[in-house]
Each structure stands twice: as structure tokens, then as C-alpha cells.
Amino acid sequence: MEHGGDYRTLWQDLGLDLEAHDNLLQTLGQAYQEIFLAQPNRPRAMEYFDFVVSEIHGLRVRELVEAKEQGRKIVAGFCVFVPEEVVLAAGGVLIGLCGGAEVGFDRAEQYLPRATCPLVKSFFGFKLARLCPYIELADLVVGETTCDGKKKAYEAFGELVPMHVMELPQMKAEPDRALWRAELERFTARIEELTGTAVTAEALRDAVGVVNAKREALNRLNRLRAAEPAPISGLDALLVHQISFYDDPVRFTEKLNALCDELEERIRRGEGVAPAGTPRILVAGSPMAIPNWKVPFVVERCGGVVVGEESCVGSRNCRDLVDPSADSRAGLLDALCERQLRIECACFTPNRERLDTVARMAADLGAHGVIHYNLSFCTPYAAESFRVVRALADRHQPVLRLETDYSQDLGQIRNRVEAFLEMIGAG
Ligand code: BJ8
């Protein structure tokens, strides 16, 4: 991938496999060119996000190295239940780890069953293949007991990196809330120990403000996509969500608000990325981690436009904000707990609210159809897909179930998506 600086010494110091890393960046650069830069009529403000991707293993990594040199700790996580607010309040940096490419799977399969979700195999593979600078920079990696695939993978991953695993309950009744609240306390203590900085009420409130502002900007983007014609492609919007996990939160919020200003302007002028009448699709289901761009790529190359993601790389991560009004640290942790337990992850049972959320999002965004997307071997979302299909059928909303991994099975997916778009168009 093109980048502005020479980072070879940096990558070497981090112990990356330089040759394989060169190949990875080259492949990613080509894919980015074909998938993103080739799109017509993109908003100008996407330039910043293109730049961030072109520097994905460069400038941001250097920033993090400098942050470490100044004594800040880098914490890495895989799930939206890892509270960024606590890490920021202790002066640390939280980054989401790569898990969206078929990298190092053969090595990962020496630790994990073949029938493991690609997202899990990917973070394992990136580490074993020595291809992810972020994993190498992390002072602590935080896991959570969500699905079985992740939960068991963390046991093995803990042999390779320093880990802290949070016990996420599987239900949302009172005892479960108490458990998660206690886990937030235990996590905060671990972060304080790591950073040597006490998490005060004041610092936590500031951090809540920073992360709420980021979520508000993401929500603003999501709302603007309800316009017809759609002002931004699903590919670009997904990319923005993916970048939200590893960019500096304050800078990211500023740049995203600038993008939203431009989109508002486009909407006022009646401009879109695709003509009015283009079939509009909501994607719901498993998260799409960077660089997993398969579904919106296929939908948009087949003549549709993705207008929303009911996903953790999407609305699930930003829909609700933390109430910042408490004046004590305990009160703010309560508010954090309260917000997180509104997240409708399929790892919870029951998870009925999610069915209404998918239907409501489809209606609010003016979607003509929903693609329920799940990664291969992701049992929680696959199991829920049946109920989502029924709930949408009751509302006469067309839905397509897609299950895929990170392989290049584009032809097969294209056939199914084309048929779905045709059906919607004819309906
Ligand atoms: S809160 S969705 S980010 S757990 S895709 S690894 S579920 S087998 S990622 Fe998730 Fe947190 Fe829930 Fe959101 Fe398992 Fe499924 Fe793989 Fe998954």
C-alpha cells in the first residue's frame, strides 16, 4: 500500500515478517484501489479516510510508538464491550485489532479447530504470521466471554500475549448486570495497575465526553444515509466505522463531522452516490472488521446501495450514549454498564430487542431489503437469522441470508445478490 514515510525500521523493531508484510500491504493497496478509489462520485472528505487507510501500518503505528515513548499504554480489544472510556481515563489508548482478512489461517489452525469463525482465525493468524503492528504494540490485550469461538481462542492467545478476559454475562437480568458491573470494576483496577494512573471521576467524565462525541458523529453519519438518493456509499460508510476502532478519537470525530457537513450539503442539493430509485439494502448480523468489504462491494457493484449496518462495526457500537451526568466514578461506571447492556449482541439470550431493531432500522433508512450476513461458523448470528427472517417476513420486508468467510467466493455471492436485487426491483 502507498504510504508517505519509510517505516521499515519501525516494522523491523516490532518484529514483523517484512517480506510477508510487504506482500500484504501490496495486496491491500491493490484491493483498495479497485474497491474504494474506483467508486464514482465519492464525497471529497473521504480523502482523510483514504489517507488513514494508506497509513494503516504507518503513521498511526508511529503515533502509537510515540505515545508509548511518552509513557502511555496501548490496550487492544476485539469487542465493543471493552470500555474505551476507562482506558482513556487512565491515559491509555484503545485500539481494535485487525480481524477481517484471510491471513495466517494455516498457522491459526494449529491452535484452533478449522471450523472456527474467520474473524477469530484472522486475529490469531495476524499474530502468528507476525503481520500486525498493533498486536505487537499492545501492552495488554482484552478479551471477553462472548461466543465460544472467541472465549476458547483467548485461552490459547493468552500464551502469546498478555491478556485480560472480561466475563460478559449471557443474559441481562439483575444478577447479570451485577456481574458485568463488577467486571467493569475489575477491568478498571487492571487498567490502573497497568498505567499507574488512578481513574478519577473527572478523567472518566472527560473520557465519556470524548467517546460520546465519537458515537454522536457516527450516529449522524448513519442518520444521513436515510436520504434518498443515498449521499454516501455503503463501502465508504463501513470504512468510516472500521476506522473508528483505531484512529485517534478526537481527530476522527472532527474529520467525520466534516464529512457529515459535506453530506448534508449534498442532500440539500439532491445529490447522491447512486441515482434515486437504486435498491437500498440494510446489512444486519456479524461484524465486518477491516479489511472485510465483501458484502457492500458486491451489493454496490451489482447496482444496489447499502444504507446501514446493524452490526458492531456499525450501529450497535454507537447507537446509545453514556449518561455523563453522574458526579462520582462509581456513578459513571454504572452509566457505562447501563449503556453497554443495551447492546444487542447475539451472544445474549434472549435477544428479542434485536429483531425490532433490525425492522425499525430497515424502515427508518428506507431499505427495500435486508441482507442478514453471517460469518461462517458464527453460531449466535446464524441461529438468530431464522428469527430475523420471520420478523421481517411479518412486516413484508424482503430478506436474504448470506453466510460466507473471507475467501474470494465473489461469484457465488454475486449471483445471489443479483437475484435478490432483481426481486426487490420487481416487487
Ligand atoms: S458485542 S457481535 S463485537 S461479540 S463473528 S467472533 S460472535 S463467531 S464478533 Fe462481537 Fe462483541 Fe458481540 Fe459485537 Fe463469535 Fe460470531 Fe465470530 Fe463474532
Image (cartoon, rainbow, N blue to C red):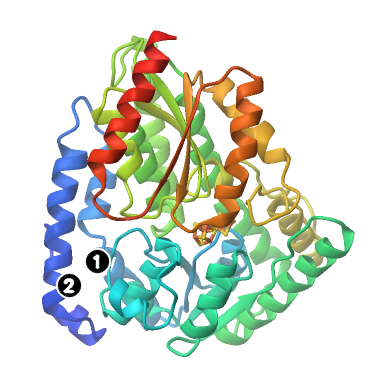
Point out the quarter of the image occupied by ligand 1: bottom right
Position above or below: 273 against 89: above
Q: Is residue 66 visible?
A: no
Quarter in which the N terminus is drawn? bottom left
Q: Identify the residue at image location x=45%, y=62%.
A: 117
Which residue in the protein does label 2 denote? 21
Quarter in which the C terminus is drawn? top left
Which kind of residue does numbered mark 1 sit on?
A: His
Position above or below: 144 against 345: below
Q: Are marks 2 and 1 in contact (CB under 8 Å)?
A: yes
Mark drawn on residue 57: 1
Labels 2, 1: front one: 2
Q: Quick one: 247 or 112, which is closer to the camera? A: 112
Q: Which circle's residue, 2 or 1, is located before the other in the chain?
A: 2
Q: SS class of the residue under badge 2? A: helix
Residue 321 shown left or right of residue 423 in the figure:
right
Q: Residue 257 appears in which quarter of the rendering?
A: top left
Q: Quick one: 390 or 219, which is closer to the camera? A: 390
Query: Residue 193 placed where, x, y %?
Result: 62, 87
Mark drawn on residue 357: none
Query: Residue 290 placed where, x, y %?
Result: 34, 55
Q: CA distance from mark 2 to mark 1?
A: 10 Å
Which kind of residue does numbered mark 2 sit on?
A: His
Q: Identify the residue at image location x=37%, y=35%.
A: 258
